[in-house]
Image: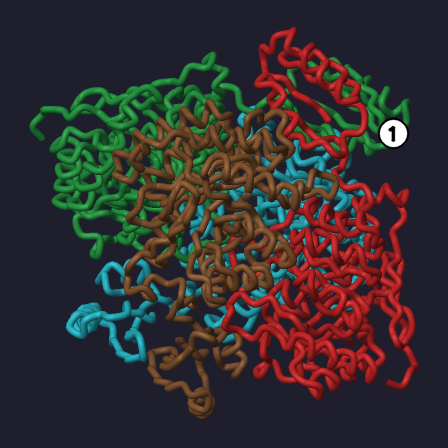
Chain colours: A green, B cyan, C red, D brown
Amino acid sequence: MIVVMKVGSPEAEVARICQEFAEWGLTPEKIVGKHKVVVGLVGDTAALDPLQLQEISPWIEQVLRVEQPFKRASREFRHGEPSDVVVPTPNGPVVFGEHQPIVTIAGPCSVENEEMIVDTARRVRAAGAKFLRGGAYKPRTSPYSFQGHGESALELLAAAREASGLGIITEVMDTADVAKVAEVADILQVGARNMQNFALLKKVGAQGKPVFLKRGMSATIDEWLMAAEYVLAAGNANVILCERGIRTFDRRYARNTLDLSVLPVLRTLTHLPIAIDPSHGTGKAEYVPAMAMAAVAAGADALMIEVHPNPAKALSDGPQSLTPERFDRLMQELAVVGKAVDRWPELELAIA
Amino acid sequence: MIVVMKVGSPEAEVARICQEFAEWGLTPEKIVGKHKVVVGLVGDTAALDPLQLQEISPWIEQVLRVEQPFKRASREFRHGEPSDVVVPTPNGPVVFGEHQPIVTIAGPCSVENEEMIVDTARRVRAAGAKFLRGGAYKPRTSPYSFQGHGESALELLAAAREASGLGIITEVMDTADVAKVAEVADILQVGARNMQNFALLKKVGAQGKPVFLKRGMSATIDEWLMAAEYVLAAGNANVILCERGIRTFDRRYARNTLDLSVLPVLRTLTHLPIAIDPSHGTGKAEYVPAMAMAAVAAGADALMIEVHPNPAKALSDGPQSLTPERFDRLMQELAVVGKAVDRWPELELAIA
Amino acid sequence: MIVVMKVGSPEAEVARICQEFAEWGLTPEKIVGKHKVVVGLVGDTAALDPLQLQEISPWIEQVLRVEQPFKRASREFRHGEPSDVVVPTPNGPVVFGEHQPIVTIAGPCSVENEEMIVDTARRVRAAGAKFLRGGAYKPRTSPYSFQGHGESALELLAAAREASGLGIITEVMDTADVAKVAEVADILQVGARNMQNFALLKKVGAQGKPVFLKRGMSATIDEWLMAAEYVLAAGNANVILCERGIRTFDRRYARNTLDLSVLPVLRTLTHLPIAIDPSHGTGKAEYVPAMAMAAVAAGADALMIEVHPNPAKALSDGPQSLTPERFDRLMQELAVVGKAVDRWPELELAIA
Amino acid sequence: MIVVMKVGSPEAEVARICQEFAEWGLTPEKIVGKHKVVVGLVGDTAALDPLQLQEISPWIEQVLRVEQPFKRASREFRHGEPSDVVVPTPNGPVVFGEHQPIVTIAGPCSVENEEMIVDTARRVRAAGAKFLRGGAYKPRTSPYSFQGHGESALELLAAAREASGLGIITEVMDTADVAKVAEVADILQVGARNMQNFALLKKVGAQGKPVFLKRGMSATIDEWLMAAEYVLAAGNANVILCERGIRTFDRRYARNTLDLSVLPVLRTLTHLPIAIDPSHGTGKAEYVPAMAMAAVAAGADALMIEVHPNPAKALSDGPQSLTPERFDRLMQELAVVGKAVDRWPELELAIA
């Protein structure tokens, strides 16, 4: 921490402040500048809040954090090495990581009925997906919109898993549902709206399934990594970060602004794998392919793409869903770029 | 709903679309323009998603909602009349509403110990506050920061209520805690980070205590009212909206941007009472008085202000807390403006 | 400036960097922390760019500016005293400043014809305005919209000045027009879209009339003060800052978000007078009165309000203009709050 | 245009409004809904402002534009065909367009001296660039920062053009400089801060050199296309759009948020070629390669990349500049992806 004093701070006050910091177990070091005095704080400052320190004296102008606020999520925590998140699925283990082939997750926004989810699972598997997404519990802006089929949808996901061999990823919205969802899901998703639902983060951190943590609509990179830190600190080391578009001033065409720069930014900050969701990230099926291509070229470790057998009849998020045919075609397009950057998985010879 | 067709849409396709809408129980009406054809949809469109309708045909360019998406929260739902939210407190009922005196809520960010919370309660009551705020469960960006004393803090709030006669407002963050918090609190607060925690909204909507619904950091007015709609639709008519600053591009000085224009905007949209929180809204104690003055002049129904006996030693949010002395002075300043706009409460003659 | 080194920086590299800084005429001071080394730079750092310094070595993690980037605009430049901007008008000098009565500027978005502008001038003067606003050159999003009557409108403003005795404030958009506009205007306005039109800032800084500098739609406080610094550095000490709403994620109801927190924020940073424009700040006439009230209570030094004799027929910005009748009423409402905070001008007895 | 009436609008008022629209030469068509009445306006509505129409009656709730506000910039204006912008350079004509190979523009932020600019030109040409960028006039946040060498830098650009055969692109900031800059430059750049400097747009629209129009920091897609419309309407058909990052709430790591979704969005809206500037778009050299890769995969028609022989000593924007070595390597990486998507130029056999 760096404590910047206001111009004209009395020497006695600076001394008093240094004294106070020393009592907190920190070692203060004073630098006298031409206009200003600055105090560097040496010691364990990670738990301190810069704004809080500022309250110690009205003569403090600014307190600047020099260390990152996150620890377990930081790249340094693993001495610069990326972490692999290994997820067992009926078709075998799938690995998310910077040095792994890109993992594709596909499926509908919400689970509507058995035929639809099983059929979609088979289709996306055939196209190369490793995981099936599908919501049992749906966060909807309106209380009058379809809220997901809940528990019964979990059973349908289990059936689709059985039928296709794909891993299952589905969202959990309430601490009360975590155990139930974790029974069926191979990966638990925490949605953008719950990124700072700290009760939920602690709960998913205390169970054993990997966590897919979407970035909040207006979460900074630091806040996002601190949300991951909640899960990691609760004992769960398997976190995958997923960018899904941030909220900006222009929402007329793309509903959100997909922030692909998180790819190079997060690489230097964290060891965690990074997924991109171009479907929510743009909100419109016709924009999805270009953004998926961009994500692959920019170094994403995983893609999450909405696919629905009949988008026009979808109970939720139809406008951003691809048809299975379009998804097939997209996977072929992605393979070309994915191979060019040496991140595309070998075609498996399995019979779905 | 208004369905705008693309230039050159085949007549047969427009006819097909009209047919499909008719099957949904809507009455389509076609307007033929110079360049474009537009279809107006008459009927119950409140549950429809404009983006979803768009999927019906690739020839649809845009679907525009003409009706508001919220019903129970709308001003029209009460035929233009504002609603009063009456909250019983030991000192008697307090009424929040557009035609009522301004209600002041004050207290520390978090409940630290009995002496501190009881003392603060007495001081803010003496200055004119009607409610004590104080967090038992605290949403904190970092898992390593103080998370609130939880259940034991609820008991301290009960003691402060007893000692001061003030009503209690405190935040609930987990559906599992709703019953427990509702036992002590006179008003349940849903924080900004949980504004779209729909499981929580349903749960607080299903119990009897009034709900204080903070605006999410990047929630639009419509999303905020839809969150209120969740509570109202679950059966709880007593919702108070609270603006607490939105996230914008400049956070160097004020941490959030307090959006006071919600006051005139919400007045025409909803019947619900509106509170302003200048403490979170700016993040810095020195900016609070000017913004509190502004809120009173612009027509706020309530103010929520952080007061801490010793901000420098506060376990959370110290930088934005006023000292009791500064709060006393502020209440006198506010009274001058509050009286000028005819919204300030008469001084009670009670002995605290 | 504070230079933060990366963990594990070689001592020799730190030494090399210190050497390099010394060659630039700065005095580096090293602080050795538990994890990190930090170098404080003492000397004249105002012209240095933190990001630039960072390039000196790949071992530098961050460079933090400790001094404000603005000088002449800073409060410290006037030893904590606010500056008064005195503007001569036919009705006598008008003073903008923190310790002065609030100055009201009113008038239409654009000058349409002589009758309309002269009539509006008389009406707003009668209601208490000291300046007439009215655009000769209009920044319009569309090339097909009315662009202002240009030079001929300047003559009409001169006529309105003559007829009403009010000072004139009007926008200049092109360096080529500065001299022409300065002949007629008592104050030159630089609009939000030109806040970083540096050629224009230099030009208005090099002439003698006061400058009314609107905040850019997405300008930070620092960028805004640096724009003022351009004018001040060019030799013109008479700058008035005007907040007119910033761009945020929600533009459905209010077109911009009026950021009233600039009032307490700027007070501590700068000596310059601060105006608020609730008309552009909200974009809708019905929101203007509440925001004007808020501005007065929060400590604005001036208000700029759009008034048009017939908003429905206005050639530009009709929706946000008040009728003269509504403006009369608003001025009476503002007077109540303005007197309560001791900032309202005495009624002059002049006969207009 | 679609005019939505408020609930309960008197029939006589609707009739009056229709009458008024008819007098404006529009053909109003009434749709009577269950709750609301809507009036469709048929005719030439492009020049009308929706907010203005709203003023016609207090019973109007909303006016929605159905047509795009831009004409010449619209894809429909060219019947769905993209336009090619052909720019003569000493090395031969270079074509920007959707069906053309990607054009790379590279060079330093500002022109510092002859050796540096000529040398950089040769190096970037050898790596495959077709245009040299370099600022003679620089928009700088601070008046105390280096402002560009101005006119003398234009001569150095001419020398670099001569030496390398590359086309020149450079920024013009003042209407007074347009003629001078157009003498040397093959493409005139209008910077982000001047995107709505309408005087400048008209001026560059009235001369013959192509215009490179950067998106404003907080410009919506519509505003950007309307800025292009200014240039097109003034008679200059050769406009290239350039995304360079927008301003969002998180600027800690990437300085701006590069909005790559403009690629699929603009494709459907406009026929104009689209360039991406990952250097300004992220503000940091280490993020540039990933974003350049993404831009190529997502379908950009051109790239603008900052390259400086010695970023640490650059007079401006050093932190976001690549070294020539890194640029060489990046061009090879881009070629792999560019070929995969069939947009990479054949290597020319010229001797630089």
As drawn, the residue found furthest toward the left would be: A351
- Quadrant of the frame with the C terminus of chain D: top left
Which residue is labeled 1 in the image? A9
- Quadrant of the frame with the N terminus of chain D: bottom left
Horizontally, is A2 left or right of A184 in the view? right
D274 up-or-down from D46: above or below: above
What residue is shown at x 61% (from left), y 8% (from top)?
Answer: C10
Amino acid carrying label 1: it is: Ser
Disc 1 is attached to a residue of which chain?
A: A
Horizontally, is D7 left or right of C199 in the view? left
Q: Nearer the viewer, residue C167 or D172?
A: D172
Disc 1, SS: loop
What residue is shown at x 74% (from left), y 80% (from top)?
Answer: C155
Q: Nearer the viewer, residue B180 or A51?
A: A51
Give neighbour class at mark 1: few <14, some 14-19, many 20+ (Cα, 10 Å): some
Q: Position of residue A309 (x, y in %)?
A: 17, 48
Q: Position of residue B156 (x, y in %)?
A: 64, 35
Q: Nearer the viewer, residue C202 or B146?
A: C202
